[in-house]
Amino acid sequence: MIDKLHYISQQPQNGSHLTAIKQALDAGCKWVQLRVKNQADDVILEYAIEANKTCTRYGAKLIVNDHPEIALKAGAYGVHLGLQDMSIAEARDIVGKKTIIGGTANTFEHIKQRIADGADYIGLGPFRFTTTKQNLSPILGLDGYETIMAQIRSANLQIPIIAIGGILPEDISALTQTGVYGVAISGTITHATDPAQIVKHMYQELNTKYLNQVI
């Protein structure tokens, strides 16, 4: 089961990815993606092992960004691959059939390819500009999501679509009405003064049932 709220880790000013992840879990997040950039593999593996232990204690799922081998060694629930990362087929050979694999997309063509390659869910974005990611793909905005989700319905494709990229709590209602399954959030939770209230509000918005929702 793919959760509707994905927390993407980032290092806060005071702390590490691990402290940010624990804060998100304390706030009620159930799906965490460890996203560590520009670090050695052994460092990321240490993060992943500890993050997975913490997620397990909270009954949450850990996804490792970019690194199938690390996801496997850490016992993570899944791996998420960007457009410039290893192919889903290669990652599947490494992690096996039971591990969840998510893939980033920016266009309808990307989505069709991700589905053909065997992705379990798709992170579609970015919604707006975000400093969290370098080499940002073209911004979709609400109109972009409406267009792509309509194309998905017309093609009768079935896969959870997670909106990502600079999303704020107040964006969720409109995004969900386009048919997306869920959203991925980073800074909004990392830097929140009351993360638990933010997470509660977002789950309430995401669990509101809309017609035409693609799952």
Image (tube, grey):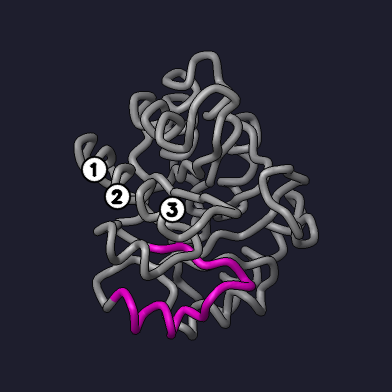
Q: Amino acid at mark 2?
A: Ile
- Check contact, mark 1 vs mark 2: CB within 8 A: yes
Q: Amino acid at mark 3?
A: Ile
Q: Amino acid at mark 1?
A: Lys
Residue 192, above or below 90 = above
Query: In this picture, which residue range is highlighted in magenta?
Result: 79-95
Local packing at callout 3 (Cα closer than 10 Å; few below 14, some 14-19, many 20+) is: many
Residue located farthest toward the top when viewing the structure as drawn: 193
Q: Residue 90 occupies which quadrant of the picture?
A: bottom left
Element type at mark 2: helix
Q: Quadrant of the N terminus?
A: bottom left
The answer to which of marks 3 and 2 sits earlier in the sequence is 3
Residue 139, above or below 54 = below
Name the residue beneath numbered marker 1: 53
Residue beneath the point at 62% across and 67% down = 105
Residue 46 visible in this rendered orientation of the protein: yes
Residue 17, above or below 214 = above
Whether the magenta-drawn stretch holds residue 30 is answered as: no
Residue 49 bears which disc, if any? 2
Between residue 158 and residue 51, name the one nearer to us. Answer: 51
Name the residue beneath numbered marker 3: 44
